[in-house]
Image: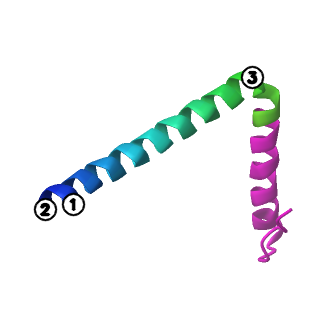
Amino acid sequence: MTYLSGLLGLVAIAMMTTLVLLAIRRDRDMRRNAPALVVAGRAQAAAALAAPAESGQTTPPAVH
């Protein structure tokens, strides 16, 4: 039973590592293929977060 638990733990770690690596690769590919969209999206998100802080408004922006 101990060997089975150890093997299951190794499989879980390998699966999580694979998912993280795939997410990183996907993010890099998205940035490489559409850099203007990514930059514009980040600028818009930063502006949306900064605007309420400057105006003193405490309600969070609506999620689309």
SS category of the residue bearing label 1: helix
Residue beneath label 2, please? Answer: 2
**Residue 43 screen position, x and y as percent:** 78, 42
| Quarter holding residue 17 | top left
> What's the CA distance linking mark 3 and mark 1?
42 Å
Three-letter code, disc 3: Asn
Mark 1, residue position: 5
Span colored in magenta: 39-64
Q: Residue lying furthest top in this view? A: 32
Mark identifier at residue 33: 3
Identify the element where label 2 is drawn: helix
Residue 3 highlighted magenta (yes or no) = no
Residue 37: where, in percent of width, then height?
Answer: 82, 33
Q: Are marks 2 and 1 in contact (CB under 8 Å)?
A: yes
Residue contact between numbered discs 3 and 1, judged by CB atoms under 8 Å? no
Q: Secondary structure at mark 3?
A: helix
| CA distance separating discs 2 and 1 | 5 Å
Q: Residue sitting at 42 percent across and 48 percent down?
A: 16
Q: Amino acid at mark 1?
A: Ser
Q: Residue furthest bottom?
A: 58
Q: Can residue 61 be found in the magenta stretch?
A: yes
Could you tell me which quadrant the N terminus lies in?
bottom left
